[in-house]
Amino acid sequence: MLENKIVYLNGEYLPLAEAKISVLDRGFLFGDGIYEVIPSYYGRLFHFQQHLERLENSLAAIRLANPYTSEQWHSLLEPLLDAGRNQYIYLQITRGVAPKRDHAFPENVQPTVFAMCSDIVPFAGKDTGIKAVTMDDSRWKLCNAKTITLLANILHRQDALDQGSAEAILVRDDYVTEGAASNVFAVIDGILVTPPKGNDILPGITRDVILEIAHKNHIACREDIILLSQLKSADEIWVSSSTREIIPVVELDGQPVADGKPGPVWQQMDQLFQAYKQSL
Ligand code: PDD
């Protein structure tokens, strides 16, 4: 039962149903916190150091001190993992429970630390591809931090779902940023392109792994801006994330992407990605 699943909350491991936080928690009142999503394949955390580096950057962006060292994080998360399953850790840190609701940072308050582990359910449509729709990116200028303040992202995702698509691809001033909960890749004139890191995208760990695999396997790639018009005429479009891996987009804004089937570069990358996971 889901309620019996053991989670971590502020120093304790306890059943999910017993994990409770105060309504004065700043995560609840203000969305004042950050999170990480870390895959674990058969009990081994995938690219753990990179996830921790991003966690450190997210904490720095909201001016919250990292409560633990890498080793401490590892020992804290390990008891949640099951060596027989593919899972992901959801880890959230908020600024904690303040005595009253006040926008200013509270003093002498312990952060709230919560972690739980869930199974990675293979994403339906991975092999056949998904539909996506483009829309104006309504988010702020802190997209590089993995903040729990995700209202704009969920509105974008829901907007896509309401239009019969699985993902929203966000566009700012005519250039593509990322998906509502994913990074974006396109194959343009035979080259794999993904938007460069900056304040308007989350530096995805899957994105980094894809670029690393491309370099190692001599797949031509570059980090560069993608104009909406270039996306619309791309030979392939993919979205990537820790929980869904690499998903081909076969229809964009109601039009097929190339021949409307997952493309050869995606096929190659997906195989290399699966082999890479196995090798770790
Ligand atoms: N989200 N961009 C956004 C806005 C995201 O929310 C995510 C992932 C990514 C991909 O990052 P990574 O490859 O490190 O998972 C890019 C997670 C999975 C989530 O919010 O559940």
Image (cartoon, grey):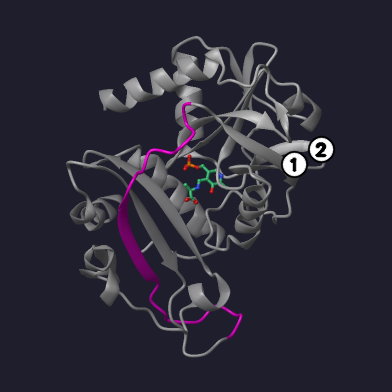
Residue 209 position by quadrant: top left
Q: Is residue 26 visible?
A: yes
Q: Is residue 145 left or right of residue 56?
A: right
Residue 92 position by quadrant: bottom left
Q: CA distance from mark 1 to mark 2?
A: 6 Å
**Disc 2 residue type?**
Asp
**Disc 1 residue type?**
Val
The x and y percentages for residue 96 are: 43, 76
Q: Main secondary structure of the magenta part?
A: loop
The residue shown at (28%, 55%) is 73
Residue 251, placed above or below residue 98: above
Q: Is residue 225 visible?
A: no
Q: What's drawn in magenta, residue-wise? A: 102-127
Residue 106 is one of the magenta-drawn residues: yes
Q: Which residue is mark 2?
A: 174
Q: Is residue 69 left or right of residue 157?
A: left
The x and y percentages for residue 184 are: 61, 34
Q: Are marks 1 and 2 in contact (CB under 8 Å)?
A: yes
Residue 130 is one of the magenta-drawn residues: no
Element type where label 1 sits in the image: strand
Q: Which residue is mark 1?
A: 171
